[in-house]
Amino acid sequence: MPILDAHSFEFFSRSPEQTRRMGMRLGALLQPGDLVCLQGDLGAGKTTFVQGVAQGWGSLDEVSSPTFVLVNAYRRADGAQLSHFDAYRIESLPEAEELDLDALLARGALFVEWPERVEPVLPRERLWVFFEYDSEEHRDLRFKAQGERYGSLLEKLRDIAYGAD
Amino acid sequence: MLLAIDTSTARLGLALHDGAQVLGELSWVSSARHTQELAPALGGLLAHCGKAMPDLHALGVAIGPGSFTSLRVGLAFVKGLALARGLPIIGVPTLDIVAASVPLADSRMETGQTRKLAALLQAGRGRLALVWYSPAGDGWQAEGPASVTTADELEQSIHKPVLICGELTAEDRQKLARKFKNVSLASPAQCVRRPGILAELAWKKWQAGLVDAPAALAPIYLHLVVGSLP
């Protein structure tokens, strides 16, 4: 698991199960207001990763693709919310803005798929994850933190991932 | 009787106005979801005032600018009531409420000159929604549509005496106070958008026949980002 610099690291997943486990570790560390962007092509492991995140976070709801509903909200027993936004079908930046991402962030953590499409409306501080397809089972996940909160989040994630391996 | 509803920002407001007086008024900063609080709060206000739904004859609503989600909640609620009970809707720009809370006499200075009023509210991520008002007849007249600014930009644009009123953070206040000779800043209590004032403005428009078509009435959305997708 190479460390690229203090604000990024790379994880080579050898199976969907490993991708999901990485998501679970991140899910357990989430705080309300956290923004995580997931960039990668179809089949690169974004949904598998979010399924892990929701499980690690403690979701009562099952993860489904928000491509057509735009935003899914998952609930936890203590009333907390996790939002899952898919920007694939967004046609303009004002349309993205009207979804009121700030209101979603005020309620809990937010995961964004296809974030590169709506980058100008996203807060500058965030965790960005690049997913790349290597081979049938192998995926390359690159984490990049912007801002103090995400630097420390990434550090914790790295510690947990190392400790567990 | 007219019901006024303001859900422009995290502050929610409800008021009942019978033409002669504001019978009841509720205003609070919501920490939870507007949708969950609005209907029970209206039920409570009606009960406190000894009124019921059939007593409502018109609906006044603040139409923004404000935050996207909270504006939608208020407009959807009011439209639902209007459709179910066949009531007219009167939309009022949110910053008109802010402006109306400042006495018009404050525009006149000892020198005999008049000063303009900047009405503000939080537009998200440190930005402010701004409309300039000038005195006209017995009220404040908006000089144009709302624009997006910051406390720094506004402070730098002020070169003569002005009044400032609206939702401001402690930091915004500090920045604007740097122009202390030219800026007269309303106190935090005076800056609270009062639903009773919304009710009064809506009542006047209703009496003047300025009613909105429920299907066409849309919130004033202020976009911070313009442009097409990359």
Image: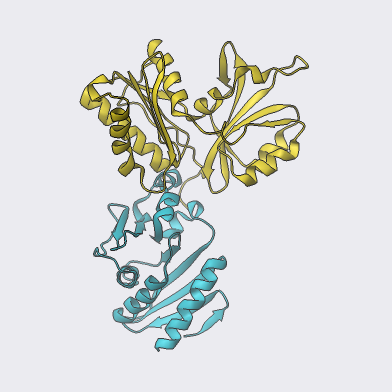
Chain colours: A cyan, B yellow
Q: Residue at x 36, y 74 (%)?
A: A23
In the figure, A136 relative to A148: above or below? below
Quadrant (top left, top right, bottom left, bottom right) of the C terminus of chain A? bottom left
Could you say which quadrant of the image residue B46 lies in? top left
Could you say which quadrant of the image residue A60 lies in? bottom left
Q: Residue at x 40, y 37 (%)?
A: B71
Q: Position of residue B168 (x, y in %)?
A: 58, 40
In-image side of A155 versus B182 (left or right): left
Q: Residue at x 36, y 42 (%)?
A: B34
Camera sees residue A90: yes
- Count every numbered label the image shows and give the total: 0
Instruction: Between residue A70 and residue B19, name the one nearer to us.
Output: B19
Q: Position of residue B215 (x, y in %)?
A: 30, 26
Q: Position of residue B90 (x, y in %)?
A: 37, 21
Q: Residue at x 69, y 43 (%)?
A: B175
Q: Position of residue A149 (x, y in %)?
A: 53, 67
In the figure, B59 relative to B28: above or below? above
Instruction: Between residue B104 and residue A120, name the one nearer to us.
Output: B104
